[in-house]
């Protein structure tokens, strides 16, 4: 009896530990609906493919979900709501290795730009390789791919004046 309790306890601890280790992207800060996305969630959303040159200048096709759709799902100010003080909001993208990059919300919004930034989970038709995935931000149209963060874990919206 005692032994089975111990086994049960260890099993639950193991399940909690593995659940916490599941890769995800957490969207927090100035959002009305904080959101955590898991790999399967990206497959239930509308997907698109964009091209990005790697640091050696070779093109790759990345597939995933437009970042704007994810921000809208979390209740971030986009489109017509992106005016006045909301134009001083920014997105901080945090990755598993501590890498951080920043965008103003207007840089990501289809009312301001035609560029489509994507939270990708596939490159050239394959799941992202270990070390790059499971989530990579893909930022087309820049001269260097330095803001195309791999292993993204958090999207944080803040006011610049905070
Ligand atoms: N998480 C994370 N993402 C990152 C980096 C990093 O150090 N950590 N380096 C950036 C830089 S400086 C470059 S040039 C590109 C390289 O991407 P590539 O391997 O597709 O060429 O990744 C970017 N994304
Ligand atoms: Mo780089």
Image (cartoon, grey):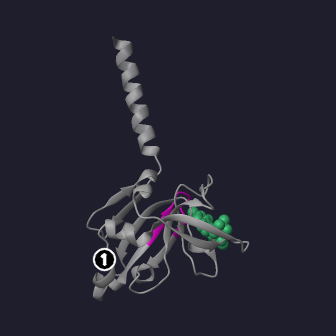
**Which portion, as a residue range, is magenta?**
92-100
Disc 1 residue: CB within 8 Å of ligand 1 = no
Kindly identify the residue that appears in the image at 42 percent across and 73 percent down: 91
The residue at which mark 1 appears reads as 77
Q: Residue furthest right?
A: 56
Image check: 77 left or right of 153? left
User: Closest to the observer: 162 or 131?
Assistant: 131
Q: Is residue 45 above or below residue 10?
A: below
Q: Quadrant of residue 41?
A: bottom left
Q: Secondary structure at mark 1?
A: loop
Kindly identify the residue that appears in the image at 37 percent across and 30 percent down: 12
Q: Is residue 32 above or below residue 104?
A: above
Q: Quadrant of residue 6?
A: top left
Residue 148 in magenta? Answer: no
Kindly identify the residue that appears in the image at 40 percent across and 77 percent down: 90
User: Closest to the observer: 157 or 24?
Assistant: 24
Coordinates of residue 148 in the picture (x, y in percent): 57, 70
Instruction: State which image quarter holds ligand 2.
Output: bottom right
Q: Quadrant of the C terminus?
A: bottom left
Q: Quadrant of the N terminus?
A: top left
Q: Residue furthest left?
A: 32
Kindly identify the residue that appears in the image at 53 percent across and 57 percent down: 96
Image check: 55 left or right of 30? right
């Amino acid at each position: 009896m005692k032994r089975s309790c111990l086994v049960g306890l260890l099993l639950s601890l193991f399940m909690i530990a593995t659940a916490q280790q599941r890769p995800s992207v957490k969207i927090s800060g100035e959002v009305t609906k904080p959101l955590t996305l898991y790999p399967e969630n990206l497959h239930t959303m509308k997907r698109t493919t964009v091209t990005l040159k790697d640091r050696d200048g070779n093109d790759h096709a990345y597939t995933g979900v437009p970042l704007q759709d994810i921000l809208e799902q979390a209740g971030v100010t986009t489109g017509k709501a992106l005016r006045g003080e909301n134009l001083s909001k920014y997105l901080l993208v945090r990755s598993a290795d501590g890498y951080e990059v920043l965008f103003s919300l207007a840089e990501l919004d289809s009312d301001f730009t035609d560029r489509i930034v994507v939270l990708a989970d596939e490159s050239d038709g394959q799941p992202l390789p270990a070390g790059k995935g499971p989530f990579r931000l893909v930022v087309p149209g820049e001269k260097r791919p330095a803001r195309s963060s791999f292993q993204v874990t958090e999207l944080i919206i803040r006011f610049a004046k905070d």
